[in-house]
Image (spheres, helix red, strand yellow):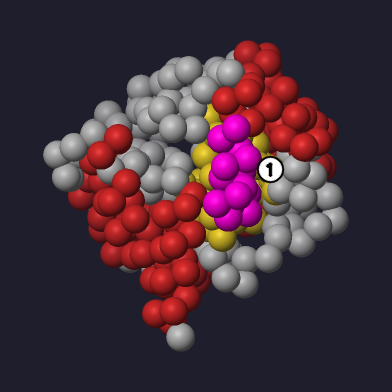
Amino acid sequence: MGRLLDISKPVVMGILNATPDSFYNKGRDSDLDSLLSNAEQMLQDGATILDIGGASTKPGSKLLTADEELKRVIPVIDTIHKRYPDAWLSIDTYNAQTAKEAIAAGADIVNDVSSGRIDTKMIATVATLGVPYIAMHMQGTPATMQQKPQYENVTQEILDDLRKTCDTCAHAGIKDIIIDPGFGFGKTLEHNYELLRNMHTLRILGKPILAGLSRKGMIWKALNTTPDGALNGTTALNMVVLQQGANILRVHDVKEAMEVIQLYQLLRG
């Protein structure tokens, strides 16, 4: 509370999944010691933010109750916050109750894949908490989002949707809004790459942009590999999103993302 997150140059958000069913196993573990070890390594590798989630949002996943989610994330947040008080912690949740209790336990940011659509109390709750809010675009819900997603103009529709979300958040009293175009959330392979080519247009909203491409299907399916084999592709596309204006890279592999940022800074001169 009261701290300023410096994104004058791009920063890395490391993914910590306290869930047994995420799509990629690195950073995924229900064992507290393993999660703490992963957190320590990510911070050593240069992560500015750790994004802690207790509910999988992979395609087809069902919604998780706040009670179950809290059992998974609160011990992790509490322990990391006490051990690394200077680290920025984000709670990855669509449940307002989880957001409220996570912030009380030491989290600094709320990251909501649904932009307040799954839990209609979320935006008002975040406004009351007075913390930054990451609002992501998703067509449908995790359970339905990949069932024939359709757009006439994917970039324009996402821009319009995020603009409305930003207006709603600002009207509610949220001062710090970060936008996420939601790669892989209710989008086909073609939609994802069209969005990637045109992501710079989102800068018109004047908000920091988070990009989460790490080891997603838009990479491993295109390369005919698996999430385990998608690090090289992730690294390549992380450079593209930086050139398109991303301020935050949300990744499983912090060291490699930091190297991309270092080279990007040199490229910019």
- Between residue 22 and residue 26, name the one nearer to us: 26
Residue 256, image x and y in percent? Answer: 42, 54
Taking the spot 41% from the left edge, 71% from the top edge, the residue there is: 263
Image point 46% across, 66% down: which residue?
A: 261
Give the residue at mark 1. 89
**Eyeballing the image, is 80 above or below 12?**
above
Q: Which residues are magenta?
A: 37-51
Residue name at image x 58 percent, y 18 percent? 31
How many other residues sit within 10 Å of disc 1, few (<14), some (14-19) or many (≥20)? many
Asked whether residue 187 is in view, the answer is no
Image location (x, y in percent) of residue 65: 60, 16
Determine which quarter of the picture holds residue 100.
top right
Q: Residue at x 68, y 65 (%)?
A: 6
Q: Amino acid at mark 1?
A: Leu
- The image quarter containing residue 58 is top left
Q: Give coordinates of residue 18: x percent, y percent.
A: 56, 24
